[in-house]
Image (cartoon, grey):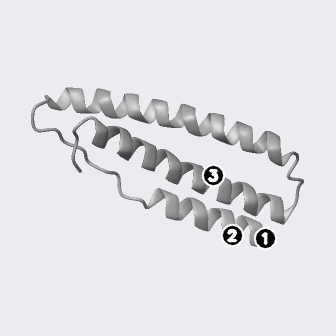
Amino acid sequence: MKASTRIIAAVLLLAACAAPVRWHHASLPEDQWRRDEAACNRRAMQKVDRETALSDTVAGNRGSGQGAAYENAMARVAAAKRVRALVAACMTAGGYER
């Protein structure tokens, strides 16, 4: 197995192992929690997509090969972390707690 394939597999495994966050709100019904979390997630993903598109435009072509595969894998991990942080900020602003 190539080194880049092992790195990507390890990154994806670590990302898959991240425990999901359970949010709750004392004064809202549980079905509202899911809708609010879905809305926060959708907005976060849109924001990260815009940020990623902008950074890709600025960076230009990243090339190919092992270095580019590693950079792409790390960019995906960073984007996933950014989405989780934005969702957490959105939910907390809405009065939710973990």
Q: Are marks 3 and 1 in contact (CB under 8 Å)?
A: no
* Figure quadrant of residue 67: bottom right
x 37%, y 31%: residue:
38
| Residue 1 in view of the camera | no
x 81%, y 58%: residue:
68
* Figure quadrant of residue 36: top left
Q: Are marks 1 and 2 in contact (CB under 8 Å)?
A: yes
Give 78 or 64, whichever is nearer the viewer.
Answer: 78
CA separation, marks 1 and 2?
6 Å
At label 3, the amino acid type is Arg
Q: Position of residue 48 (x, y in %)?
A: 58, 40
Q: Nearer the viewer, mark 3 or mark 2?
A: 3
At label 2, the amino acid type is Arg
Q: Read off the residue under disc 2.
A: 6
At label 1, the amino acid type is Lys
Q: Crowding near pointer 1: few (<14 within 10 Å), some, many (20+)?
A: few
Task: Check the image and report above or below for 92 versus 50.
Answer: below
Question: Element at badge 2?
Answer: helix
Q: Read off the residue under disc 1.
A: 2
Report the number of numbered marks: 3
Q: Crowding near pointer 2: few (<14 within 10 Å), some, many (20+)?
A: few
Q: Position of residue 79 (x, y in %)?
A: 58, 49
x 73%, y 38%: residue:
54
Judged left or right of residue 18, residue 81 is right
Q: Read off the residue under disc 3.
A: 76
